[in-house]
Amino acid sequence: MANKEQLALIKQGVNAWNEWRKHHLEGNSHSIDIVPYSATLREADLSQRDLSHVDLYRVDLCMATFQGSSLYKANLKKAALYTANLRDANLIRANVQAADLREADLSMASLRSADLTGANLQRATLYTTNLREANLQATDFSLANLGEADLSLANLEEANLREANLREATLYTTNLRKAILQDAKLMGADLREADLTMATLRETNFHRANLSTAIFSVANLIGATLYRANLCMSNLSLANLCMANLIESDLHKATLVGSNLIGANLYKANLQDANFNQADLREATLCMANLVGADLREANLCMSNLREATFCRANLEGANLHRATLWEADLEGAFLKGATMPDGSIHD
């Protein structure tokens, strides 16, 4: 239990607490063990303290400073930490469920294996923060800065990352099922083997991101930027990539069965051995694209631009090429049985 002197100081307010701390806690690791329910430590200076295992359930810690402090396994469930300073703090395995961390600064903090389920981190700063294996299910990171953060193996299912900054972030094997990443910035991010099934990725920027072997089944990627992104062996089955920018992207051996690519730009994309079975590529741009060995059976390429594309050994059985532009396209060795040609004739 917290000692009587500390509790009395808490009741007097932040000024009394900070003054006492200045004279009594400097140079040692004393800390509050349990703060009474609904207590307030607004604006309190608790930096460089060992607060491991402390119970701060529902405590008002708005604008408080925890810079460099250890909150290892601390209970911060439903705590108010609005604009709190948690830079370089140790929150490993802490319970931060449903806490209010709006606009809080968690730069360089460690939240490895912490539980932030349902927490509010709108506009929070988590630059280079360690969130490996953290439980972030249904957490609100909208407009947050997660640049270069480590989110490997984290659970972000149904999390809100709308307009969040995730530049150069590491999301290796991260669970992002049903997550909202609309308008998010993931330039240069590492999303290898990540699960984005049914995620909302409309207008999301994946410029030069590594998405190899990632899962995007039934994901909404309308208008997404995937310029020069690595999508090698990724699964985009039934994904909506309408009007997406896939210029010079690498989709080598990717699976796009039944995907919507209407109006998508695949200029100079590497689509070698990719599976576009029954995909909708109407009015898509595939100029100079590499489609060697690609599976385009029953794909709809009506009015698509295939100028100078390479279809060597590609399977176009039953594909629709009506009114497509095939100027200088290389169809050597392509299988065209039953395909509808640009002039409307059926290839025998």
Image (cartoon, helix red, strand yellow):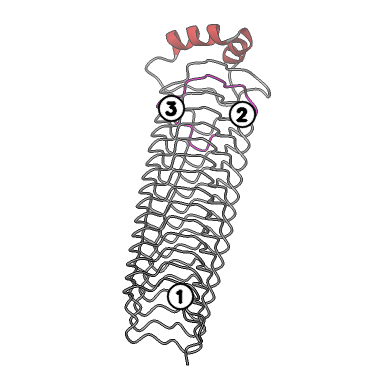
From mark 3 to mark 1, how far is it between C-alphas?
52 Å
Residue at 53 percent of width and 80 percent of height: 298
Q: How many labels does the image show?
A: 3
Q: In the rendering, which numbered label is found on residue 79?
A: 2
Q: Residues within 10 Å of mark 3 (few under 14, many from 20)?
A: many
Horizontally, is 2 left or right of 134 in the view?
Answer: right
Q: In the rendering, which numbered label is found on residue 69?
A: 3
Magenta highlight: main SS: loop
Between 211 and 51, the residue placed more toward the observer is: 211
Question: Please, what is the three-letter code of the amino acid marked with disc 3?
Answer: Ser
Q: Is mark 2 on a helix, strand or loop?
A: loop
Q: Is mark 1 on a helix, strand or loop?
A: loop
x, y percent for residue 124: 50, 31
State which tag comes first along the sequence, 1 or 2: 2
In the rendered image, the vertical position of residue 347 relative to residue 17, given as above or below: below
Between 314 and 10, the residue placed more toward the observer is: 314
In the rendered image, the vertical position of residue 57 relative to residue 342, given as above or below: above
Residue at 48 percent of width and 74 percent of height: 276
State which tag comes first along the sequence, 3 or 1: 3
Residue at 52 percent of width and 81 percent of height: 344
Horizontally, is 1 left or right of 294 in the view?
Answer: right
State which tag comes first along the sequence, 2 or 3: 3
Q: In the rendering, which numbered label is found on residue 169?
A: none
From mark 2 to mark 3, how far is it between C-alphas?
17 Å
State the image quarter where residue 291 is shown.
bottom left
For the record, the magenta segment spans 55-74
Pointer 1 residue: 275
Which-is-in-front pick, marks 2 and 3?
2
